[in-house]
Amino acid sequence: MKLSKYFVPTLKEVPNDAVVASHVLMLRTGMVRMLSAGIYSFLPLGYRVIKKVSEIIREEMDAIGGQEFHLPGLSPREIWEETGRVEAFGDILFQIKNRDYVLAPTHEEIMTYHARNVMKSYKDMPQIWYQIQTKFRNEPRPRSGVIRGRQFLMKDAYSFDTSYENLDQSYGLHDKAYRKIFDRCGIKYFVVGASSGAMGGTGSEEFMVQSDAGEDTVGYCENCGYAANIEVAASRIDVKKRDEVSSDVKEIYTPNIKSIDELCGFLNIDETQTAKSRVVINDGKPVLVLMLGNEEVNETKLESILSGNVRPAHPEELVEISGAEAGSIGPIGFKHRIVADLRLKDANNLFSGANKTDYHFGGIDLLRDVPSIEYYDLRSVQSGEGCTRCGSNLAVFSAIELGHIFKLGTKYSEAMGANFLDENGEAHPIIMGSYGIGVDRVVACFIEQNHDDKGIVWNKTLAPFDVHLIALNMKKEDVVKNAESIYSKLIEEGLEVLYDDREAQAGFKFNDADLLGMPLQIVVGEKKLKENKVELKVRKTNERFDVDVNNIFEKVKELLM
Ligand code: ATP
Ligand code: MG
């Protein structure tokens, strides 16, 4: 491809709202342009990468027996009503003026619709159906370029089986295929066992990459691969050590002391000597939640322990529940359920509220004074804490979900009446799985992980072109002649070559080549040509080689392998 004719509108500056590296670089390299918030057009260079990722996905999906479909984006609303997902998706679902249709945010319903019409017998299964197709979601906060768009490309696959054992197999095949896909793309990822969330099901895993642009927080152990969403992640608990002697409980006058920090300052104690109280209402009943010092409650953990409806108690309810206002509430004398974080297990000599406004107790021994207390893991893990599996240090960071594999079970087949007959002629709902990869996200995440201050650093697999050929001075006949012949030769040999044949300054061309980031650059200049040589540069390492014009292909092949 000749750059003089190819539409690659590179930019020096990008709009202020582009802050994430991949977003900035996809704009600067002319891979994409924004049409409207969260809606992006892929331009020729960007679309080449999309096609490469898609091809890898196709190969690996076909290798596990997947059959490629292409479903419409527009779908009848009534199909989505069968599963109740018009309501479940809420505002995320794009509804069009003609209320009979919606724009599909995913395709479980549509695939189930087709399965229902054809898979009548156990003999018709297993099946794996997939597609690479545009999805529409009215995301409330589209951001980070194509990482969270309102329209995006997804590979979505669906498996149809007659038993849960067979579902496990289909799920396992996808797990392997996903690892191969991301490995082949050269993406550094890790796998998180996720909660099944709103989709309902019996098991799922998320393929994640570490990135500041991520909206999920995870705990990850590099040593053993343990990874979990912060909502459920656990770490080795450092229980507060019990002092040998427990003092007596004593009441202390603490006027206007509301927070743990104020209490520590007032009594000149450390926050690890205190227990912080919070009251929530769980299905109408008060529960005291007790944490060590200033540690925050992890809301998801709390909700899963209490189950049912959980809300904070209103300030006006507190006096009635505990006898004291916020800031003076504590475990001794609290007449309702008390749950405490594991770190407080059997701790003594603690300071906490006295359930009397402006008073605290000292010398609290939870073992002696609060026998009904229940202990749970209630806090979020923090970087540096021990992994529960291997003891190494956990890291806590933001991450982006690249892919998701999910045992759906019979949620959709039951709702939509997709049944099959078994060997005995008995009807059962089809057992399904669903498996998604965000194709645009794969491209963006690769860039997140592979760039430097000059631009993108593509690998051979995803690079839009293998080689970026630069003719330094288009006015020199010799340069042009040699560049053209290298260009034709490399193309003949099956390589993809981007040829900068523009009339422009050398510095400008070098900058663009580094920005666009093809793995190899070949520079054809007057000076080196005098010795019948050109310069080869490896983008990633900046290594340079002077290569004889006649040996270029061999050297290129060696460096690209
Ligand atoms: P997220 O939690 O990031 O919103 P999700 O749980 O909604 O993702 P799924 O419904 O499982 O995602 O979709 C499968 C894949 O599609 C995701 O793993 C992700 O790679 C991609 N994806 C989802 N939403 C978007 C979006 N708004 N923009 C780009 N890609 C997306
Ligand atoms: Mg989502």
Image (cartoon, rainbow, N blue to C red):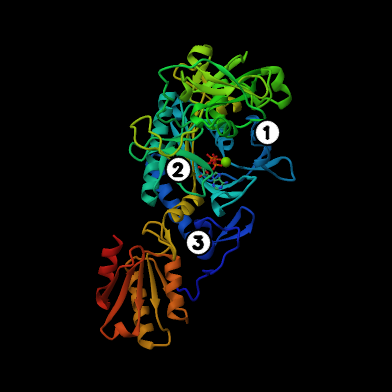
Identify the secondary structure beneath mark 2: strand
Indicate yes or no: mark 3 CB to ligand 1 under 8 Å: no
Q: Nearer the viewer, residue 345 or 267?
A: 267
Residue at 50% over, 71% down: 6
Work out how far the residue at label 1 is from the one at label 3, CA to CA, in angstroms. 37 Å
Badge 2 amino acid: Met
Mark 1 and mark 3 lie on one chain; the one further toward the N terminus is 3
Q: Which disc, if any, is residue 208?
A: 2
Q: Nearer the viewer, residue 224 or 432?
A: 224
Asked if residue 558 lies left or right of residue 457, the reply is left
Identify the secondary structure beneath mark 1: helix
- Rate crowding at label 3 as few (under 14), some (14 to 19) or many (20 or more) other CA atoms within 10 Å: many
Mark 2 and mark 3 lie on one chain; the one further toward the N terminus is 3
**Residue 531 x/y as whole percent:** 25, 84
Badge 1 amino acid: Glu
Q: Which residue is mark 1?
A: 87
**Residue 324 x/y as whole percent:** 68, 21
Q: Which disc, if any, is residue 25?
A: 3
